[in-house]
Image (cartoon, rainbow, N blue to C red):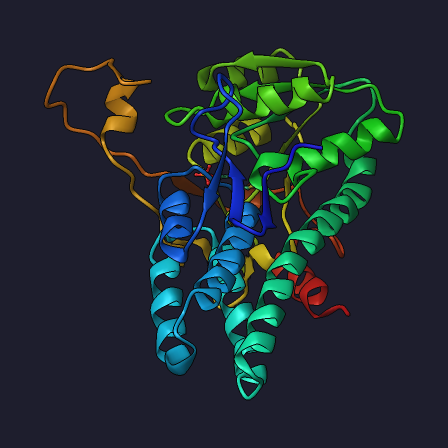
Amino acid sequence: MIETIYWNDEGVVMIDQTRLPNEEIYVTCRNYQEVADAIRTMIIRGAPAIGVAAAMGVAIGVAKADPANLDAELAVISKELAGTRPTAVNLFWAIDRMNRLYSEIRHLPYEELRDRLIEEAKLVRVEDIEINRAMGRHGAPLVPDGKTVLTHCNAGALATAGYGTALGVIRAAIEAGKKIDVYADETRPFLQGARLTVWELQHDGIETTLITDNMAGHFMRAGQIGCVVVGADRIAANGDVANKIGTYSVAVLAKENNVPFYVAAPISTLDLTLTSGEQIPIEERGASEVTQVFGIPVAPAGTKVRNPAFDVTPNRYVTAIITEKGVARTPFVESLRALAEQK
Ligand code: MRU
């Protein structure tokens, strides 16, 4: 399996996703500032992977902090990490988890406290892989045999600690013996579909076809797509889903063409404090992602640009939400809460 992120004696190691698919380079972040930069610049990206990075960022921050000033330093570390990207709630979930543990064990001697936080961050990573496998088991039966699955962005091993959410469901369906192939939207402007999804599915020998984002409707209308499976960055209590920009268009096209639209996401991606997707903060990224492709201008100099990195798909377009605890269907307010409260 592809190693997206792990901890070693030198720091937090991540595959540099800005260099894929042309170069497979691992970078080591030796302090929390470098982890924060890696999240901000999308060396690591994808909601669950960002969560693991944030947990490890807190751990390495405490490991490098002044033991006499830990409370204050942890607050600074947490603020810096929380300021990296606004949409994926897993980032805040992981920082909260690490802070909660710190509060419980802050009376311990520094070395012990530090080691416990490092172990917790490693646990967030291991649990994420287990969660993705469980999600795969719940989602695999929904994927129609002998059909093409369309996915948008990268919700795979690279977006998680391993195996993936949406791609985990696809992997699990194939492991269960289903004959499935994948259409991957290229996912402008950052090209997570073309660069990352195609790379990792090829790596696993899964038959994959790359299409540009504006081709999805054409293939759905032609009856060539059996279902859509995507990931999520934040899901509101009513089942509205924030995911990579372009997901909303895919969902509307899916409904119009009677194609089931599934979202695969861990419980840590639910934000039950928000009643609807309207309240989800949407990250706006820099203009150069739109005006350039690999540094080459594709628009006149000075072009005015908008670059929202995510959109919100209203719950009426979502057929089901696949989590590690089971599958939620409409009415999502009840089904999501029931899954979240399930032990
Ligand atoms: O901007 P990114 O690449 O971090 O956005 C990633 C996505 O939108 C993914 O679809 C989402 O995080 C789900 S990942 C399992």
List x then y, in percent, for residue 216.
53, 18
Where is residue 107, by image quadrant?
A: bottom right
Residue 331 visible, this orientation: no
Rendered position, 325 above or below 157? below
Where residue 251 sits: x, y (%)? 54, 33
Relative to 269, residue 61 above or below: below
Identify the image quadrant of residue 269. bottom right
* Image point (46%, 20%), residue name: 213
- Which residue is pictured at 76% across the width and 57% down the height? 325
Residue drawn at point x = 57 percent, y = 49 percent = 48
Work out whether residue 111 or residue 226 is closer to the camera in this orientation and state it. 111
Depth check, front residue: 116 or 66: 66
Left or right side of 264 for 107: left
Q: Nearer the viewer, residue 20 or 134?
A: 20
The correct choice, above or below, for 272 with respect to 214 in the image is below
Report the side of 72 relative to 228 (left or right).
left
Q: Residue at x 29, y 34 (%)?
A: 307
Residue 49 vertical position relative to residue 104 in the rendered view, above or below: above
